[in-house]
Image (tube, rainbow, N blue to C red):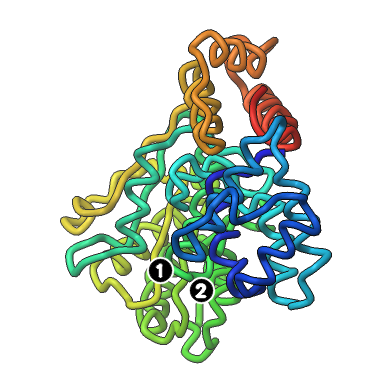
């Protein structure tokens, strides 16, 4: 099995912490039958490790799996063992080694969405003028909700933020009280000051009172949180809930709390407040043949392989087989599963033939 460029980087960082140069030289000779001084006779320890791994990777079929197995057997450090397991599992796969460009997160594939990737950089690397609110819109079948996978990944890998997702379709009720109750619980906010609400949860005053309560709580959030509210274009949210969402977006965008960023998925209402002009916006589109083709091209790059156009077309055709227009949710899910199954086979083989 060939290792990805990203896996190689992690091993180059790990090996010096687990082996001295003399021990690593002996390890390669005893366990893998190669002589470090022949492959990499000079250079820093890290450069010699890199050359040794590149040599193993270049052998027929790649010997990356042998290296990982031998390292796990010979390494007694618990932290190193855990990291080796993560490396073997492909924590994420990126053609550039950069977490922003990840195309696989665990076993989940993420196709295209270059615009969303760029906008999320503003979330983890903000300035005084960057909005803390992102709106993701798109047609009914466009993969908007699938955005969560990339958002969660970037939050954890880039900002050390806690990603929190609330799917309105899964709540018992779509009224503003139900939504704010879930926000309070998920963000671990104190119930102190919770408003005395009207008997009718759809009363227009409820949204304003709950927004006012939240305004007083934003500054108490102690850890960075990326809050994603999904299914806003579904049947569940009431008009009053949408009014509450608008209040929350304006509050977060205006005050830019130190530890809170808000993502609204499927919120089609235009926010009329002047502040709304500065909110980040992304448009989701269902993947097409060119997007799937680009995915496999980037997967090849993660193994330092350049694929011919004909091979890329064949891979995209295979993933899209029997998935013709019009695209619906079931077909979109089937496409994702096809890409993921194909990718897992390629990973098991250590790259493309």
In this picture, residue 120 sits left or right of residue 107: left
Picture quadrant of residue 81: bottom right
Place of residue 275 in the rendered image (x, y in percent of width and height, measured from the top left): 19, 59
Place of residue 268 in the rendered image (x, y in percent of width and height, measured from the top left): 38, 41
Location of residue 252 with respect to 270 vertically, above or below: below
**Alpha carbon of mark 2 to alpha carbon of mark 1: how far?**
8 Å
Picture quadrant of residue 73: bottom right
Judged from the image, the secondary structure of the residue bearing numbered disc 2 is loop
- Whichever of labels 2 and 1 marks the residue nearer the N terminus, that label is 2
Q: Residue at image x 67%, y 66%?
A: 24
- Total marks shown come to 2
In this picture, residue 157 sits left or right of residue 67: left
In this picture, residue 185 sits left or right of residue 246: right
From the image, tell me which residue sits under label 1: 205
> Dot 1: within a 10 Å radius of its alpha carbon, few (fewer than 14), some, or many (20 or more) residues?
some
Q: Residue at image x 66%, y 73%?
A: 18
Depth check: 197 or 304 in front?
304
Location of residue 18 with respect to 276 vertically, above or below: below
Q: Residue at image x 73%, y 69%?
A: 82
Judged from the image, the secondary structure of the residue bearing numbered disc 1 is helix
Q: Quadrant of the C terminus?
A: top right
Depth check: 199 or 336 in front?
336
Location of residue 160 with respect to 146 vertically, above or below: below
Q: Is residue 140 visible to the viewer in this orientation of the structure?
A: no
From the image, tell me which residue sits under label 2: 198
Depth check: 298 or 220 in front?
298
> Dot 2: within a 10 Å radius of its alpha carbon, few (fewer than 14), some, or many (20 or more) residues?
few
Q: Residue at image x 66%, y 63%?
A: 25
Place of residue 190 in the rendered image (x, y in percent of width and height, measured from the top left): 53, 88
């Amino acid at each position: 099995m060939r290792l990805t460029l990203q896996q190689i980087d992690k091993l180059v960082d790990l090996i010096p912490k687990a082996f001295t140069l003399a021990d690593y030289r002996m390890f390669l000779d005893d366990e893998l039958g190669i002589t470090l001084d022949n492959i990499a006779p000079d250079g820093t320890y890290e450069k010699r490790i890199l050359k040794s791994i590149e040599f193993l990777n270049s052998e027929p079929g790649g010997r990356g799996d042998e290296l990982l197995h031998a390292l796990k057997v010979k390494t007694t450090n618990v932290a190193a063992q855990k990291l080796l397991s993560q490396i073997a599992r492909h924590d994420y796969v990126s053609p550039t080694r950069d977490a922003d460009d990840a195309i696989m997160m665990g076993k989940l594939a993420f196709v295209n969405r270059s615009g969303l990737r760029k906008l999320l950089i503003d979330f983890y690397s903000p300035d005084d003028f960057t909005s803390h609110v992102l709106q993701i819109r798109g047609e009914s079948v466009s993969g908007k909700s699938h955005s969560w996978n990339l958002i969660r990944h970037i939050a954890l890998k880039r900002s050390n933020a806690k990603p929190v997702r609330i799917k309105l379709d899964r709540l018992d009720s779509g009224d503003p009280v139900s939504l704010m109750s879930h926000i309070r619980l998920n963000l671990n906010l104190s119930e102190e000051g919770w408003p005395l609400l009207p008997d009718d949860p759809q009363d227009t005053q409820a949204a304003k009172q709950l927004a006012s309560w939240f305004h007083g709580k934003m500054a108490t959030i102690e850890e960075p949180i990326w809050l994603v509210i999904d299914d806003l274009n579904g049947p569940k949210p009431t008009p009053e809930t949408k009014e509450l969402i608008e209040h929350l977006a304006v509050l977060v965008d205006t005050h830019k709390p130190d530890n809170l960023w808000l993502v609204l998925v499927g919120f089609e209402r235009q926010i009329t407040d002047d502040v709304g002009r500065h909110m980040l916006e992304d448009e989701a589109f269902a993947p097409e043949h060119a997007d799937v083709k680009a995915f496999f091209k980037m997967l090849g790059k993660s193994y330092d392989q350049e694929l011919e156009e004909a091979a890329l077309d064949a891979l995209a055709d295979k993933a899209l087989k029997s998935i013709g227009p019009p695209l619906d949710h079931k077909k979109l899910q089937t496409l994702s599963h096809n890409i993921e199954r194909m990718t897992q086979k390629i990973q098991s083989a250590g790259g493309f033939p």
